Image (cartoon, rainbow, N blue to C red):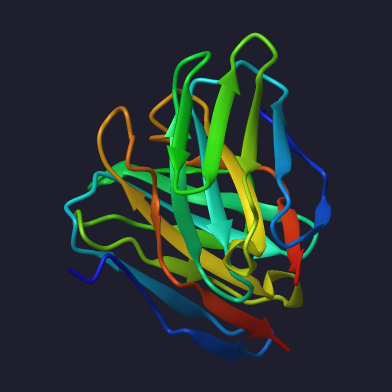
Amino acid sequence: SQELEQSPQSLIVQEGKNLTINCTSSKTLYGLYWYKQKYGEGLIFLMMLQKGGEEKSHEKITAKLDEKKQQSSLHITASQPSHAGIYLCGAGAFGGGADGLTFGKGTHLIIQP
Amino acid sequence: NAGVTQTPKFQVLKTGQSMTLQCAQDMNHEYMSWYRQDPGMGLRLIHYSVGAGITDQGEVPNGYNVSRSTTEDFPLRLLSAAPSQTSVYFCASSWGIQGALGYTFGSGTRLTVV
């Protein structure tokens, strides 16, 4: 079965600083999803990457997919308190995720004022 | 547009009791799935469905049953609750082969089994 390893497990960053979260898959990636979860709440979809080399941005969050390394990175520029939460990467076994998603264990992000 | 609605939001069960967690979506999504989230374990897939009448097991299906009689509803049944099933349960739905809009998640059900 596919496993996703996220690093770091937790991150404390001063407000205004940049940060990167990584997600590495044990198998070929056919699509990689990034979600954000506020503590005690549901998951919010950030973006999905499908092709190697693909890069997407949403506000100050940018994600890239490196197919060869079976890895994706999520980069936040000029972090704000609203960026705090748990970031989760997910992947489907056959691209569209029809058979559900496998998730990493998450990266807990704390923004210090 | 309600999205994915999960009920109840909170539930306390006694060991051995049964219950059904409800999940409904109003987006005409084909794909639906159930996950449980436990501290240090992330989200784990319990069951999924690719359409009405079709369901299959995920990573941790033991102790849970599902059915999908309509496109909109995907209930999760706990047959005989055990303390190990104390968790936060999320239902999600998506559509299309590409799934570029990702899965939409419900707000979760917090279940405690005592």
Residue name at image x 63 percent, y 77 percent:
B81
Residue name at image x 82 percent, y 50 percent:
A9
Q: Nearer the viewer, residue B12 or B109?
A: B109
Residue name at image x 46 percent, y 69 percent:
B77
**A32 horizontally vs B4: left or right:** right
Asked if residue B15 is positioned above or below residue B31 in the image, the reply reads below
Q: Point out residue B21 in the picture as x, y percentages from the top left corner.
A: 44, 74
Quarter of the picture holding the C terminus of chain B = bottom right
Q: Nearer the viewer, residue B38 or A14?
A: A14
- Most extreme residue toward the top is A68
Asked if residue B39 is positioned above or below residue B31 in the image, the reply reads below
Quarter occupied by residue A34 = top right
Residue name at image x 65 percent, y 65 percent:
A84
Quarter of the picture holding the N terminus of chain B = bottom left
Q: Point out residue B11 in the picture as x, y percentages from the top left corner.
A: 55, 88
Quarter occupied by residue A63 = top right
Q: Point out residue A3 in the picture as x, y percentages from the top left corner.
A: 71, 32
